Image: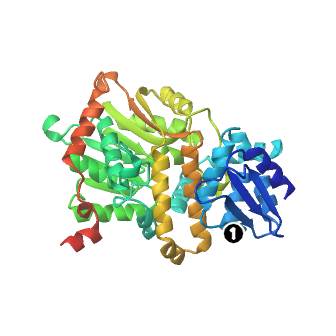
Amino acid sequence: MWLLDKFLKRAIHTGHLVVTDHDGTSHEYGNPGETHDSRGPLKIRLTNKKAAGHIARYPQLGAGEAYMWGWLVVEEPHDIRDLVLFVTANTKREGDSAIQPQTRFARILQKVGARLDSVNPKDKARKNAEHTYNLTRELYERFLDEDRQYTMAYYREDPENTSLEKAQMDKKAHLAAKMYLKRPEDNGGVPMKVLDIGCGWGGFALYLHEMYGCEVTGVALAPDQIAFCNERAEAAGVADKVKFHLMDYRDVEGEFDRISSVGLLEHVGKPHYPVFMEHTHRLLKPDGVMMSHCCGRAGPPGATDAWTRKYIFPGGYIPALSELVTASERAGWQVMDVEAMRFHYSHTLEEWYNRTVMHREEIVEMYDEVFYRMWQFYLAGAEQAFRNGALVNWQVIYVKDRTAIPMTRDFIQEESASLRERGAVPSWRFDPMLKQAAE
């Protein structure tokens, strides 16, 4: 316990944390007169004699595993989200070093491991995608919005009074507006061709067709995602206009007016940024526009923590803006617009967490208690990174020719407002089960 005790004494400055070790000894940290919230001090129990050492030697990996395995128990009325946000709100005063491995050698191993893990040839990229996205679709139905948007929602208004469904619809409008799409009647009667890389469950591709009449090709690497996308397109009667393929983006051929990449670059891997930028540059028409939305670091380049790489996103890496811009410049892209989306993802993840907890019994039945706790820890850890850490979402507009978009950003706000005014697309239009029920 001495090593964990040393870490917590250094890390916890505000609030009141009580830790009961496996042998019943109690340790207090912070200010006993300053409780975490109106529910009193935050209390945790360590149920295994190995727990304290496992957590202290590598807080990011050890804490997650201890919670998954039941070695760390958060006493009611608090839960793991309260603990994660409490600790990281304290440690952010000292920066990321407060929760890094305790020795220099361990930190070097962490960085080397993260770099090797981000090398994603096609076979590995497919396996990584299946690890994350080929979980049962029923799982994602339990915590995502009805359109299954598994990326940041856009809270234009007070998050406390905005539903996840509305925020995700506003996100789609915001992204679509930045793509500067033209409807057939404004494009010589010809529908634009759009490539949606990393299309998820198809919601954005279907939205683009609904709003602009464009022909969309969506590609992703998780078989169940693509199967579901095609089911949705069939249910909506647009399978001839919106097509989805189980395909690596590196295998896509053809020429497109617009390219969207939403939540994809986090999975590409830093070593593959040059290939991504060069290949998409080849696929886009000379007067085209590419819109990229991804998680990002507000500061310098870093490394993906071991717990996330091991359990949630193998091969994943969240880029700094400098890394994206450098790779795109070398491929011939011109960056026309950059927006840092701050805190939107923390609110999104909070809602995902709440919905996950709401469906605890069903998720445990689908998998088991260890999986459920792993998912809790993932969502809480991700939320803290966007709330207390230095993560943001980057939205970047790339072009080959500077005349491809208007001279001012007014077009984004005007088109977004127009799309929102048109209203949400009824969910049953794109969902086989809901459509059948509606009929």
Give the secondary structure at mark 1: loop
Task: Identify the residue shown where x is 27% and y is 43%.
Answer: 193
Q: What residue type is labelled 1?
A: Trp
| Residue 243 place in picture, x, y as percent | 30, 55
Please state, as top left, top right, bottom left or bottom right, where the N terminus lies in the image. bottom right
Residue identified by numbered label 1: 69
Q: How many marks?
A: 1
Task: Point out the residue furthest to the front here.
Answer: 33
In which quarter of the view is residue 111 placed? top right
Q: Which of 186 and 400 is in front in this view?
A: 186
Q: Which of 94 and 184 is in front in this view?
A: 94
Please tell me whether residue 304 is drawn above or below residue 26 in the rendered image. Answer: above
Task: Point out the residue furthest to the right here.
Answer: 2
| Residue 189 place in picture, x, y as percent | 13, 39
Q: Can residue 313 be seen in this view?
A: no
Q: Is residue 436 left or right of residue 179?
A: left
Q: Which of 428 and 166 is in front in this view?
A: 166
| Residue 19 place in picture, x, y as percent | 75, 61
Please tell me whether residue 327 is drawn above or below residue 110 in the rendered image. Answer: above
Disc 1 packing (10 Å; few <14; some 14–19; many ≥20):
some
| Residue 374 place in picture, x, y as percent | 60, 64
Task: Point out the residue furthest to the bottom here.
Answer: 365
Task: Identify the residue shown where x is 60% and y is 57%.
Answer: 82
